[in-house]
């Protein structure tokens, strides 16, 4: 790993780097059933990687902190990142296989996912390079354990930059007090409706989100699948419904959502506008098969928002 960033950055992603094997089929197979796929895609994946690519497509200067193996998949990850203009100087090559995810999706948007973390497990708190982070405006953590999320936010606070986190499976395993400690200090926190219900034992609504709003964060954003998403700063509450689109594959939609939310947040510091653009980004993404297929540039995203007259309601 190099010690210094070669360029000024807008966003740094900290997360998993995988190769995704995505199979499309009419329905998901039952136990012990052989089922045929009608389409297969091999692509760069991992929540952090999806987020990074989405940010780069939106015109942000992006760097990444993570690990891949010293194998052909690791070579492919680096090659694809460079093609997306993402800085790879803080990606470690380690003696473990590059992460792999196998996704089975239906044309109705249902899917199951099995992940092998592999090299991703080699990332340590000491790899969170403060010298690298000081060149950025925001750092985003996706699907990493508490020790990584804490290391990131502590350095972000010290440097005076924004921090964002996707509360994935690793953090959902924690008890409430442990989770609160892991996310304290983050600017933008993202989770889905099932995650909210698992943590708070209630479905997300205006009443429950404001009542359960975690202390120590700025914005809480909850995605609701095809129903859209909600966001709150603990006082104001916003809901945005997406336009009707034909969903082909929801893989990576949440990562694209977080990328657009943070891109607009950095530009305008407006939670309502950030939510609208995030919902629009996800609506565009789900119309394509593959975690990073169809990710829009900012001009396309803005036109989609205007064409569909998207807005929030309180």
Image (cartoon, rainbow, N blue to C red):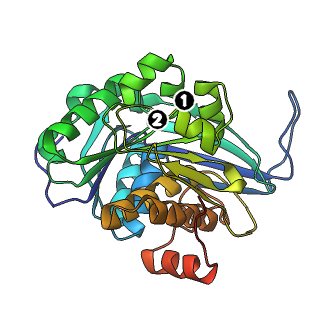
Q: Position of residue 121 (x, y in %)?
A: 40, 26
Q: Position of residue 210 (x, y in %)?
A: 53, 39
224 lies left or right of 252: right
Q: Position of residue 103 (x, y in %)?
A: 66, 43
In 3D space, how far apart are the residues under numbered discs 2 and 1 (Cα atoms)?
7 Å
24 lies left or right of 44: right
Can the viewer see residue 36?
Answer: yes
Question: Which part of the image, by quadrant, shows the C terminus?
Answer: bottom right
121 lies left or right of 133: right
SS at badge 1: helix
Provide the residue designation for mark 2. 143
Q: Position of residue 199 (x, y in %)?
A: 58, 25
Query: Which mark is first along the chain, 1 or 2?
Result: 2
Query: Badge 2 local density, few (<14 within 10 Å), some, or many (20+)?
Result: many
CB atoms of marks 2 and 1 within 8 Å: yes
Residue drawn at the location 19% of the way across and 46% of the way down: 133
Residue 194: image quadrant is: top right
Can the viewer see residue 85?
Answer: no
Q: What is the count of numbered marks?
A: 2
- Which label number is shown at residue 64? none
Question: Which part of the image, by quadrant, shows the N terminus?
Answer: top left
In the image, residue 12 sits, relative to residue 152, either above or below, namely: below
Which is more toward the observer, 154 or 69?
154
SS at badge 2: loop
Residue drawn at the location 34% of the way across and 33% of the way down: 216
Provide the residue designation for mark 1. 169
Residue 9: image quadrant is: bottom left
């Amino acid at each position: 790993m190099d010690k210094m960033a070669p360029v000024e950055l807008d966003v740094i992603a900290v997360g998993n780097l995988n190769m995704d094997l995505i199979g499309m089929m009419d329905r998901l197979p039952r136990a012990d059933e052989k089922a045929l796929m009608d389409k297969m895609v091999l692509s760069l994946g991992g929540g952090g990687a999806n987020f990074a690519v989405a940010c780069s497509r939106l015109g942000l200067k992006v760097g990444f902190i993570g690990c891949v193996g010293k194998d052909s998949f690791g070579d492919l990850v680096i090659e694809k990142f460079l093609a997306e203009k993402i800085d790879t100087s803080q990606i470690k090559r380690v003696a473990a296989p590059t992460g792999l995810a196998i996704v089975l999706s239906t044309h109705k948007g249902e899917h199951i996912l099995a992940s092998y973390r592999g090299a991703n497990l080699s990332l340590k708190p000491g790899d969170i390079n403060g010298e690298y982070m000081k060149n950025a405006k925001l750092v985003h953590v996706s699907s990493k354990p508490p020790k990584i999320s804490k290391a990131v936010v502590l350095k972000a606070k010290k440097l005076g930059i924004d921090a964002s986190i996707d509360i994935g499976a690793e953090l959902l395993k924690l008890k409430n007090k442990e989770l609160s400690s892991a996310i304290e200090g983050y600017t933008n926190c993202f989770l889905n409706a099932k995650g909210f219900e698992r943590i708070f034992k209630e479905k997300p609504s205006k009443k429950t989100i404001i009542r359960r709003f975690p202390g120590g964060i700025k914005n809480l954003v909850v995605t609701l699948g095809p129903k859209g998403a909600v966001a709150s700063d603990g006082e104001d509450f916003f809901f945005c419904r997406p336009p009707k689109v034909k969903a082909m594959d929801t893989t990576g939609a949440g990562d694209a959502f977080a990328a657009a939310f943070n891109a607009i947040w950095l530009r305008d510091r407006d939670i309502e506008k950030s939510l609208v653009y995030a919902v629009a980004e996800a609506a565009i993404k789900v119309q394509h098969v593959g975690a990073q297929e169809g990710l829009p540039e900012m001009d396309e995203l803005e036109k989609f928002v205007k064409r569909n007259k998207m807005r929030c309601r309180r």
